[in-house]
Amino acid sequence: MLDRRSGKNLYLQIIEILTEDLEHMPFGEQIATETELAERYKVSRGTIRQAIARLESQGLVFKIQGKGTFKGGHLVQHASFIMGNFTQQLLAQQMIPGIRNVSVKKEQADEIIASYLAIPVGADVWSVRRDRLANGVPINFSTGYIPTSVVSKLRASDLEMSIIDMLGKKFGHRVYTATNLCSATLSDKYVAKRLNIEEGAALMVLEFIGMNQKNCPVLYDKSYLIGNTFSLRIDQIISQ
């Protein structure tokens, strides 16, 4: 059940509970409706809808219009590891990080953004778009989303290099932990133009959800990395 005294966001607790429940369900089994889940956990349907959207984005559930929500596949691997931010990773590889075409705009959070940031759909967020460079060559197009409740005023000039460093050093919202989601896609026309690549080129998609000391999300960052410039290493301990 939910621990309402812990200070941990109820939406995040519901995600954890539903994820654990899904582990014991066969693929394709229908889960409870939003109304049933809202009544079970004594929260609003909006909170449940955000949690379901988060699970759907991870492939753990899928929806059929007019039918309901069903259990999807499992994440292939979940690993806990320590990793620096993108700028730190480039420096560790003796590469020179760079940034260009920075733009900042106030937008309203859609369902996916709201689910990652644990805010209501339609809430104001800052979208921070930028191209990230390695030795002067664009390899990454990123859009970061920051709730205006976290940072009330934001300008493009506030971002010197790392959006994580900006949050911590300029606005006092240090990112302590993060969840990273990795997937693959093909470049559309807009991203291809940003990265000077052909439309349809292979891309790695890296989604970053940064949490503060209270385990509340303060940043959702979605990056498109040119496929042949990025690799992911996972070290496993195999149980016998």
Image: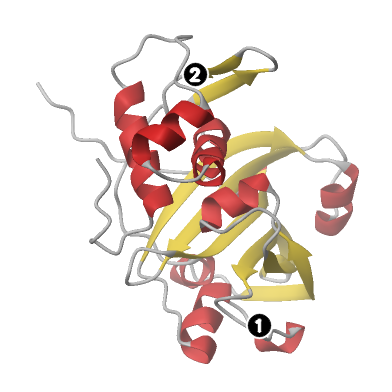
Residue to which mark 1 is pinned: 159
Left or right: 89 in relation to 129? left
Query: Does the image show residue 77?
Result: yes
Horizontal and vertical percent position of residue 144: 64, 64
Q: Quadrant of the N terminus?
A: top left
Residue neighbourhood size for the residue with mark 2, other residues' Cα within 10 Å, grouped as few (<14), some (14–19), many (≥20): many
Residue neighbourhood size for the residue with mark 1, other residues' Cα within 10 Å, grouped as few (<14), some (14–19), many (≥20): many
User: Viewer-proximal residue, 3 or 191?
Assistant: 3
The colour mode here is: secondary structure
Task: Return the disc, 2 or 1, that comes first in the chain's sequence.
Answer: 2
Q: Quadrant of the C terminus?
A: top left
Structural distance between the alpha carbons of marks 2 and 1: 38 Å
Horizontal and vertical percent position of residue 97: 61, 73
Horizontal and vertical percent position of residue 211: 41, 64
User: Viewer-proximal residue, 190 or 154?
Assistant: 154
Left or right: 85 in relation to 67? left
User: Viewer-proximal residue, 1 or 151?
Assistant: 1
Image quarter of residue 122? bottom right
Left or right: 75 in relation to 119? left
| Image point (62%, 42%), residue name | 204
Is residue 173 shown above or below 187? below
Horizontal and vertical percent position of residue 115: 55, 49
| Image point (47%, 71%), residue name | 88
Residue to which mark 2 is pinned: 72
